[in-house]
Amino acid sequence: MKALKALSAALALPILIVIVWWLGTMNETNPFVPKPGQMLNDLFTVWVGPLMAEQVVPSLYRLGVGLGAAIIVGITLGLLIGASRLARALTGPAFEFIRAVPPPVLLPVLLLILGIDDRSKIFLIFLGCLWPILLNTIDGVRSVDSVLADTTSTYGMQGWARFRWFVFPAALPRIMTGIRLALPIAIILMVVSEMYAALDGLGYRIMLFKQTFQMGPMWAGILIIGLIGILMAGLFRLVERRVLAWYYGQREMEKQ
Amino acid sequence: MSTDVTGTTPKGEVLLSVQGVQKVYSTPTGPVEAVRDLTFDLGKGEFACLVGPSGSGKTTLLKVISGLMPATSGRVVLDGKTIDGPPRGMALVFQEYGRSLYPWMRVAENVVLPLRAAGVPKAERRARVDEALEQVGLAHVPKSYPWQLSGGMQQRVAIARAIAYRPEVLLMDEPFAAVDAQTRADLEDLVRKVWKELGITVLFVTHDIDESVYLGERVIILSSSPTIILEDLRIDLPAERDQLETRSMPEFVEQRHHVYEQIQKAKRGYNADTASMSAVAASGV
Amino acid sequence: MTRPAAGPATGVRGDSADPDARTTSNRSTRMATIASARPTGSRRATFARKGWSTPVLGAVGVLAIIAIWELSSRLGLVDPSYLPPFSTVIVEVVDLLVGQRSGEFWAALGMTMYGWSVGLVISLALGIVIGVLIGSNRWVREYTNSTIEFLRPIPSVGLIPIAIVIFGVRPAATIAVVVWACFWVILIHVIAGVADVDPVADATARSYGLKSFRRAGHVVWPTVLPYLMTGLRLCGTIALVVAITIEIVVQAPGIGAMIATYQSAANVTVVYALALLTGVLGLAINLLMRLLENSVLAWHPSVRAEVEK
């Protein structure tokens, strides 16, 4: 009964919106106005099939490599810098400034240096995602609990053991926050870099549809971007709930 | 100026020796002396309590002894070796049980971690963890997370972790200050039991006078900051202690009264420079 | 419930996107330890302990990066046509600010800030109104949660083609996308703030017979304000990034379009100079938003204490 109620709460409004949208655009002839039925139709007839492999897969590949590299480098560097007061002090203002530069600004420069192929796009995604992960990791390491740090010291854990058993798990909630913030940035930069200059990819194809006034396929492409965003957010939440089960459990307990 | 007033010399061989330890913090408003020239010895197998008013440098002193913090001058010697970092032979139980257990590890994992890091073989690790959990009465919750347990149980986990580590000296920093009275009594008896069964040396810091007299074989009374030793007192109570019986014994009441008076003096803002003289006088009692 | 604690996946950094009371309290204790853990007779003397203060070290870090940049370009480690020396770029920065190109630069900056501010104001207004409507009723909150959670992760840039189709390559397109990006952030912060109103305080206000609009002023508004200010601060940065992104991608007038233009003219020095300037702009906006947040919340000392707890 309770599950049923939750389900109805979750589905009621979306269903209502789609119905209103569908009814409202039924007799619409303006090609710029998207219709839900048409959009779904275009999604399956235009995008599903070869176009998916040719345009969407390369996009996802760039996204995956760029984001993955940012996660690995961000966490590693963050743990190292965060553990040293000297390194933190040296890098603080410099990082603060670099972070403030909107990543798309680097797009023209990267294109110039690395060319129009995958490398410039992957590197842009990497650079854009690096900062939230790196800075959150540094903060996470810096703000580990002092009592727990002393406990770890008294039991003689140093170096690698200290990182593995204490610093990394203690910083993990902040690391996950960093990754969560990096996800939308990764998608944005993926799409932007393809819209700006590319030979293939989701963003490239959507702009092409727009320029050739194929509104239906364009709308369907935008729907795919939205679906990727939602899917990644959902997937991340699953992983986070699993990895940080202890963290959320503890917070639940503290609230009571 | 020295305060080597040992009203009680430790029985047997000296295990832990605190020699002229002084601790000065540098703060933006100038240096602050937290601990001044402290000297005492701890014999093997002793149970000593450090008692002093809150705000005396008890925690600082314990951090210096455990090697977490270097002393400004003086030294701490464990088993003949001068300490310059956390030594293998010590375990420290903190007051903040909620912040001294790893919240991402289950109870048994918390207890086993120091052994794992020290490279103890797997079979022995298991045996020692089971034994330690058994000793603190937590054999039934190895798979729980610490934050799922009550405060008292969390502190039991911390104690289990300490004894599984098999330290020569067990340091305890106001371990029961944050638990309720009933739990506190249970934990006090648990510590006594563990001490007797394992024959380890315990240095127990507290601001609670009753607790210090009830637990210790010896009570070292500290002044408020800068900390010096006001008195080093041997507790003449039977080895078997009971929350009700022991606490109503005339000896207990008398010694408790004595410690109380000393602490009151310390609170009234004892001048550290004159205090050492009265400490000499007190040691003659 | 969409509480910021569960993570509004938005800001560029997670500083206050995760307002975790525990972290804050831990931090203050840790600070205390660090402050006190500086013994006069320390054996391990590090830079920091020799009296090198953090700001000085920070300046050293910045200078080191500038030196590496300058030298790698001057010595030819990196092709200077890809990375001109820092000194050259700085000359260009000055030129953009007060020299030949200053007219072009300030006009572009004006366009960018126009899109930024109008977009921010619209999303603020929409976010507050809709957020209060949704947040003040538990039933409405439950029924809108899934929709909000579904729409929020849709990347703003996906809407660029739509915005262009509807508004053309004009500031209105920029504003529309900025509003999409910022509206959700404001919305979830307002909802979380309204949902956080202390039921006891609210009941007290009711029992004293405060009319609902006065109750809103005395009980609801002070609770929502800190959440709102956090959302606004995050949006300041987001709006800037989004505005410049659109300008770069579709050449809508502004700093972004200027960058794209100079890139196609292969004038790399100006591109780097503009990139530096956008960094300064980003820092300035962040600072401004923090000042605003502090001054607004300073009027509510009780609220402030509540947030910092």
Image: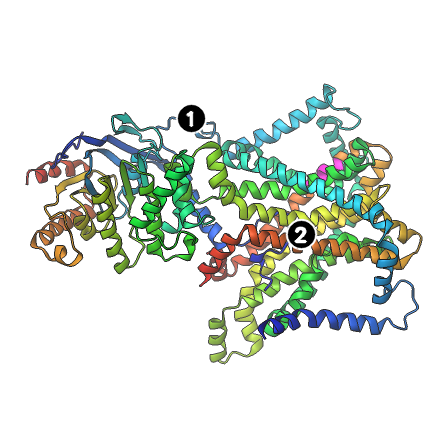
Q: In the rendered image, is residue A33 in sight?
A: yes
Which chain contains the residue that carries disc 2?
A: C
Q: Could you tell me which residue is drawn at 55 percent across and 75 percent down?
A: C214
User: Outermost residue, left direction?
Assistant: B285
Query: Is C293 positioned to the left or the right of B276 in the image?
Result: right
Q: Which residue is mark 1?
A: C45
* Numbered circle sitting on residue C236: 2
In the rendered image, which quarter contains the C terminus of chain B?
top left
Q: Amino acid at mark 1?
A: Ala
Query: Is C261 positioned to the left or the right of B123 in the image?
Result: right
Question: How many residues crowd around disc 2 within 10 Å: few (fewer than 14), some, or many (20 or more)?
Answer: many
Above or below residue C216? Residue B213 is: above
- Looking at the rendering, the stretch of residues picked out in magenta corresponds to C273-280
Query: Is B213 positioned to the left or the right of C267 in the image?
Result: left
Nearer-the-camera pick, C169 or A22 = A22
Nearer-the-camera pick, B34 or A76 = A76
Q: Secondary structure at mark 2?
A: helix
Q: Position of residue C264 (x, y in %)?
A: 86, 36
Q: Could you tell me which residue is drawn at 70 percent across and 71 percent down?
A: A13
Q: In the rendered image, is residue C280 in sight?
A: no
Kindly report which numbered mark, 2 or 1, lies closer to the viewer in this rendering: 1
User: Outermost residue, top direction?
Assistant: C75
Considering the whole magenta stretch, tell me its main secondary structure: helix
B15 in magenta: no
